[in-house]
Image (cartoon, rainbow, N blue to C red):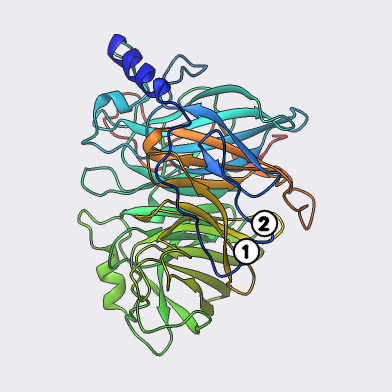
Amino acid sequence: MLRRTLLQGALASIPLAFMWRRRTARADTVSRYGELVPDPGGIMDLPPGFSCRVISRRGDLMSDGYLTPAKPDGMACFAGPAGSGTIVLMRNHEITSSDPASYGPVADGQTPPPNRYDEAGNAGVTRVVMDAETFEVLSSNLVVFGTVHNCSGGPSPWGWLTCEETVALRDHGYVYACSTTAESAQPAVRIDGYGRMQHEAAAVDPETFVAYLTEDRPDSCFYRFVPASRDTPWQGKLQALRIVGHDTMDTASGHRAGDTWEIAWVDIDDPTPADDSVRRTAQARGAAVFVRGEGCWFHDGSVYFTATEGGPLERGQIFRLDPDGDGGTITLFAQSEDVDVLDMADNITVAPWGEVFTCEDGSNEQCIRVIDEHGTVTTFGQNVLSGGELTGICFSPDGRALFINVQGRGVTLAITGPFPAPKRPPPDPGQLLDPDADTGRDPGDPAPRSPPPGGRPTTRDD
């Protein structure tokens, strides 16, 4: 505990006013929000009227007695239970098997949660409950523990989906469903149907329950999972995207923003192989190749996703998929042709009013970029903390707050200000994984099995 306390104290002692050399983030035009204003607190330069504050730091004591883990990554924000006046931020921690034990939530001498997924895993998911009006933190806790390299994920009708970006360890490389109502660590609910690969992010169509999945590999594919029925949403067929007329097309080079192609899908017969072969199987059947698929978000029938090292400069692309049954189109929505305009777009979200927001993982001072419906890139914010990579970008359900992490510093930020009003009222909280559902794990099993086919999506009133 002493060692962890010293680490926490060392982080806290670094003044927030510490800044790297500032360079003004340039983009094609000034955003609708205005020119960036230097932040006197030295956290994030933002447009006039906007401000940010730290809501969580690595090493903070959580309500369940565990410590806030390091390396916060993918996030999504959910409405709390009806009438509670709360919102719930679900947050990944990208801790690998080679990271020090001190990066995890368990202090020296503390007993880990009894339902740890795997003793080799020190990563997982945390939950932060906030007042929906003031964004004051009310509580926080572990939800899943014992997974590895939880990078991104996405919201779903069953709560948060957390994705493992590794296949180096047995029983890892999966997507897991996490309840937003879990007040303590729960058994990991693994979705085998989504495949075993170097997962990055997931996005689910709330009407059809079709899931869309990215893979962080230099020669990755883009996937969808089609359920057999809405009653069995985790039982069905995994497929990979193919460009019609261009088998195994290289999407990374030789293309311009605005280019559009018709798509089809190829089946993956074995979604959970022992080796790392899903993408090779898909490409043998003509699946398109993307360079490091990362952030992914579903909005109004379209799916937006990033290829972090695609494009003429190898500094990133953003695609928009418009599915139509077993076909549809994919459009190169934006790409980096100037690193001062866009530099390795990573996590991505769509604001309730329709603008695309993405955060960067480049070598310059990482920025928050906004892309309008025409693909024009502008700058909304610039990180001035040391610690690099911005992750986990997401909005509160009503669009009044934007949440983001500075991963290397282990901090989570809330950004507020004069955001536009949503085009429509916030969606109903929707369905969540039944916290009492059978996870398919017998007491004493060394590694959890898959959940029963589909589990059971339930409403909050169940």
| C-alpha span from label 1 to label 2 | 6 Å
Say which residue label 2 marks. 34
Residue positioned 29% across, 61% down in the render: 217
Rendered location of residue 266, percent (x, y): 39, 75
**In the rendered view, would you say 70 is above or below 108?**
below
Q: Is residue 230 visible?
A: yes
Rendered location of residue 345, percent (x, y): 44, 60
**In the rendered view, would you say 117 is above or below 391?**
above
Identity, as a three-letter code, of the amino acid under mark 2 = Gly
Residue sitting nearer the eye, 266 or 254: 254
From the viewer's perspective, tell me whether residue 86 is left or right of residue 223.
right
Residue positioned 57% across, 73% down in the render: 323
Residue positioned 29% across, 66% down in the render: 279
Crowd rating for badge 1 (residues with CA inside 10 Å; few <14, some 14–19, many 20+)? some
Q: Marks 2 and 1: in contact by CB < 8 Å?
A: yes
Quadrant of the rendered image containing residue 407: top left
Secondary structure, mark 1, is loop
Say which residue label 1 marks. 30
